[in-house]
Image: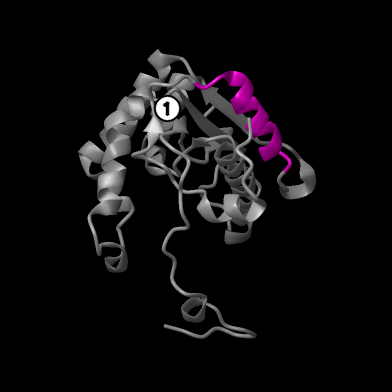
Amino acid sequence: MQLGFSVDEVLSTTRSVRKRLDISKPVPRAVIEECLALAVQAPNGGNRNSWRWIIVDDPEKIALIGAQYKAVFASGESRAHQPIPASVQRTDRVMESVQALIDKIERMPALLIPLMPGRAEGKSAMEQAVMWGSIVPAVWSFFLALRARGLGSAWTTVSLAREREIAEILDIPFEQYTQAGLFPIAYTIGTDFKPGWRAPLAEVLSYNGFAGK
């Protein structure tokens, strides 16, 4: 059931949700499929529809994948591969939110793992742009559809440090498909999300040429 938000409300209040994901409430497959049916209306390169989507709702497999997710943080790989800019380190709220997801990732009602055909390694910038540009719009559309129905997710990529291990858990042909990330799915605790802080457009926008540092 949709919550009656306007398009602008959905676009401006869809957040990466971690602390407020309700792991106690099951998410019906029908709801996930409804959101995914909307998501795949997003544009993709050549309209090939060569993506694949895996929903994981088996608690044992979720626990196994969650263990791999936690292992990345425990090993310190997440800090090595994804340094946080100093401008983001102005409060502890971001890391508190990340930790909240780490603490419950293995108990999520469901996970989404989108797959892109082929491997990104060794490809040119243009070839990689085609791959990512054919999956990212659909994943974000999935987030928007979730938000409109009182659910949420978080954009996570640290699982890619354990991509091969997760591929083994889910029988994904590793040499044929690249995982685009790991996205928890759950109803949210409350639906009163607000627009997030963003740098003013005046600081990041220029016309007809680059301006800035």
Give the x, y percent position of residue 74: 21, 37
Q: Residues within 10 Å of mark 1 (few under 14, many from 20)?
A: many
- Examine the residues drawn in magenta and state their main secondary structure: helix
Q: Which residues are magenta?
A: 27-41
Give the x, y percent position of residue 127: 63, 54
Location of mark 1 (residue):
166
Check if residue 28 falls in the magenta segment.
yes
Give the x, y percent position of residue 86: 27, 67
Would residue 208 be visible to someone looking at this image? Answer: yes
Give the x, y percent position of residue 115: 58, 35
Q: Nearer the viewer, residue 65 or 107?
A: 107
Secondary structure state at the residue bearing disc 1 = helix
Check if residue 53 falls in the magenta segment.
no
Point out the image quarter for the N terminus: top right
Which residue appears at 48% of the width and 41% of the height? 191
Which residue appears at 59% of the width and 49% of the height? 10
In the figure, is residue 172 to the left or right of 88?
right
Q: Quadrant of residue 184?
A: top left
The amino acid beneath tag 1 is Ile
In the figure, is residue 205 to the left or right of 7?
left
Point out the image quarter for the C terminus: bottom left
Which residue appears at 63% of the width and 59% of the height? 126
Which residue appears at 42% of the width and 42% of the height? 17
From what the image shows, is residue 95 above or below residue 205?
above
Q: Quadrant of residue 34?
A: top right
Q: Nearer the viewer, residue 47 or 93?
A: 93
From what the image shows, is residue 205 above or below residue 77?
below
Would residue 172 be visible to someone looking at this image? Answer: no
| Label tally | 1
In the figure, is residue 19 to the left or right of 41?
left
Q: Nearer the viewer, residue 51 or 197?
A: 197
From what the image shows, is residue 88 above or below residue 108?
below
